[in-house]
Image: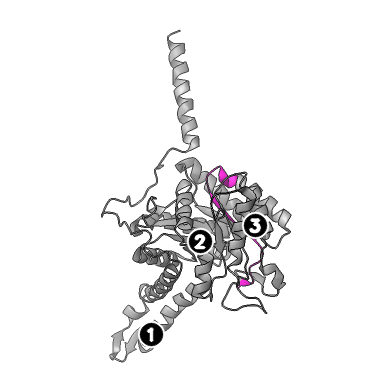
Amino acid sequence: MAPCDVPVGVITGDDVLKLLTHARENKYAIPAFNCTSSSTCNAAMQAAKDNNCPVILQFSNGGGAFLAGKSVKDPNAAAAGSVAGALHVRAVAKYYGIPVILHTDHCAKKLLPWMDAMLDADEAYFAQYGEPLFSSHMLDLSEEPDEENIAICKKYFERMAKMKIWMEMEIGITGGEEDGVNNEDVDPEKLYTSPEQVYAVYKELSTIGPMFSIAAAFGNVHGVYKPGNVTLQPARLGKHQEYTKEQISSSDDKPIYLVMHGGSGSTDEEIATAVSCGVIKMNVDTDTQWAYWDGLRKFEAENRDFLQGQIGNPSGPDKPNKKYYDPRVWIRKAEEGMIARCSISMDKLLCKGTFPAKIPEAGSVPMWDFSPSSKGPMAAVKDIGGQVGGMISGFMAHK
């Protein structure tokens, strides 16, 4: 399998479509890691570099708010934090030598103002640089009636499509609890999406463009527990592909881009089945949260006697402990724990080795890139306006 021909760093538009199509055709999925800090972003990107593969970094509403600072109570805090996280990733991603998709996670109906603000940021960035700030966004209106869910998604997709932003949507409910959305007591039957529901989404969104994916529920659960008698049934995803293929008379056996949520605790066989059915992205959060903490926990356990005060340890009462309590030391240990767990996901999703890292030569990446990489539509309009104005002035001068 030849690597996908996309650039390193944050990718958008046609490059996102190309990469996700490459994943679907070559039967691998790209892990999407929830990030809440520059530290977790860097850990996920290092894992991708070390494992020679692309990666998806995603911010939830709660993650964005945390990035802005827990003391910030402004209604736009989550959007500001998400934008800040995106700008950090854009500043450093190329140094890791791998493609990065910048994504935002679960946006329920009550969180649509967060989405509106991020799309405002995308449009402002697009006007300046010719591409959106984020690569993709997710709308999660699965708790709403299907008709309303699809209608709202279609409305937002029309706005995103103008900038070639990928859209992910969810139909059918993922159980458990994540980021304040609690579906622990949901009717088990609602944890399984039908082929007809998936096709209804495809039918409406495909009239706008091809850049969308569907998170169809097949018993998925957020967290590391399972509700009631529900079992994971990834083979159902193959039925969705078959039904839509038949409805649209497609020559493609897997015409839908599918997404897997609630993958924590899934068996290797269940993940492999999901990927074989056309899953091109799997969300990972609970497992990496634990891994990040576990890296710190082990460091503290091993060095507890050196972490009880600024001075004084088993080496002597006057010996300093700065090299142990320096945040750069113990945060790095947390990162190393997360890197190891990210690597496991990359291996399970058959993503490892699909994109040999292309580390840029020293000095070849600008330390900052504040100039437009390509002229956006507004700049082009201004140029044309200036040229027309010059022609008119010249004509009047010779009249």
Q: Is residue 397 magenta?
A: no
Q: Amino acid at mark 1?
A: Leu
Q: Is residue 174 magenta?
A: yes
Q: Secondary structure at mark 1?
A: loop
Q: Secondary structure at mark 2?
A: strand
Residue stretch rendered in magenta on the structure: 159-177
Q: Earlier in the sequence, mark 2 or mark 1?
A: 2
Q: Amino acid at mark 3?
A: Val
Q: Which residue is at a point 60% across and 53% down the rendered structure image?
A: 245
Distance of mark 2 from mark 3, alpha carbons?
Answer: 24 Å
Across and down, in percent, residue 204 comes to 66, 48
Q: Earlier in the sequence, mark 3 or mark 1?
A: 3
Across and down, in percent, residue 160 comes to 57, 47
Q: Which residue is at a point 70% across and 68% down the rendered structure image?
A: 190
Across and down, in percent, residue 189 comes to 71, 70
Residue designated by label 1: 307
- For discs 2 and 3, the disc positioned in front in the rendered view: 3
Circle on res. 374: none
Residue designated by label 2: 58
Residue designated by label 3: 198
Q: Which residue is at a point 46% across and 67% down the rendered structure image?
A: 349
> What is the quadrant of the N terminus in the image?
bottom left
Distance of mark 2 from mark 1, alpha carbons?
Answer: 33 Å
